[in-house]
DNA sequence: TAAATATACATAAGATTCTTAGGTAAAACC
DNA sequence: GGTTTTACCTAAGAATCTTATGTATATTTA
């Protein structure tokens, strides 16, 4: 993801949020989208991405449909209703995480 | 830390930043401080904390001095010069992480 | 006053999530 | 024709955490 341990644990949130925005995406597309959005500062590794997608699918958060484009297979993933709920939950947890880390690293001044 | 995978990878940053602010702290004190700052929403587990402190010390980021208070041992940790550099580096990485996650989850509108 | 909780340290087994390294295959570029 | 890009995949090992357990003293509560 980025040589940086902080990214550990956030891949699921990223996948879900991108799918919520884009409707449906295939794996390789997700890696490129993340590079594009972050100006190359984040790099989703395929060894992390594909197992994550399979797990989300197994848990019922994603559905998949294969499509043949230019003689190559693409597997398009999209959110199930359960996956949409999960996305909202994880985005809310991300906000709470950031607030907590802000509170710890930038303590408010007490008079 | 918090049932939530997002926190995975941020313990080191938390320890270093608290030590930067407080000068010196002992392990148990760190767990209490984090609870206090986050209103109980974060809970550093001892099974994660102590190995982390030992690792930071082994890497040369922390020094330790034991002190006996009310017949109990406290191990006070403080930042080495190298640890201070590391703290700045990790805080900068935290900011970059948050900016990247913001960019992905709250995409700016393009007109 | 006895039991429970809080303070204070520690380690070990197992879970989870990642990186690294490898593999297959077709299209596009040089 | 060889390299890069596109597109999927898995397995071994690393890193970080949780859970469980252990030791020991002090304080609070029933």
Image (tube, coloured by chain):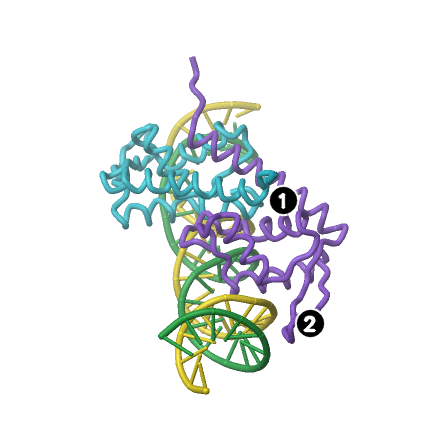
Chain colours: A cyan, B purple, C yellow, D green
Disc number placed over residue A77 in the picture, else none: none
Q: Which residue is mark 2?
A: B68
Which secondary structure lies at badge 2? strand
Outermost residue on the right side: it is B81
Number of residues whose C-alpha sits closer than 10 Å to that of mark 1, classed few (under 14), some (14–19) or many (20 or more): many
> Which numbered mark, 1 or 2, is in the foreground of this view?
2
* Residue A110 location, quadrant: top right
- Residue at 71 percent of width and 51 percent of height: B83
Q: Chain of mark 2?
A: B
Left or right side of C4 for D13:
right
Outermost residue on the left side: it is A81
Q: Chain of mark 1?
A: B
Alpha carbon distance from label 1 to label 2 = 32 Å
Left or right side of A66 for A48:
right
Q: Which residue is mark 1?
A: B90
- Residue at 69 percent of width and 72 percent of height: B68
- Residue at 46 percent of width and 43 percent of height: A97
- Residue D7: x percent and y percent? 38, 36
- The C terminus of chain A - image quarter: top right
- Residue at 50 percent of width and 53 percent of height: B35
From what the image shows, is residue A5 above or below residue C4? above
- Residue D4: x percent and y percent? 54, 32
Left or right side of B108 for B22:
right
From what the image shows, is residue D15 above or below residue B111? below
Q: Do the residues at discs 1 and 2 belong to one chain?
A: yes
From what the image shows, is residue C22 above or below residue C8? above
Left or right side of D27 for A54:
left
């Amino acid at each position: 993801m980025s040589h940086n341990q902080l990214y550990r644990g956030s891949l699921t949130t990223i996948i879900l949020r991108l799918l919520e925005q884009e409707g449906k995406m295939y794996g390789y597309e997700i890696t490129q989208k993340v590079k594009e959005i972050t100006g190359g500062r984040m790099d989703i590794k395929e060894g992390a991405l594909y197992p994550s997608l399979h797990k989300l699918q197994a848990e019922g958060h994603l559905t998949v449909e294969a499509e043949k484009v230019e003689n190559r297979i693409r597997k398009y993933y999209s959110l199930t209703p359960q996956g949409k709920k999960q996305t909202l939950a994880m985005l809310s947890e991300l906000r709470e995480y950031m607030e907590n880390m802000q509170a710890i690293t930038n303590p408010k001044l007490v008079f």
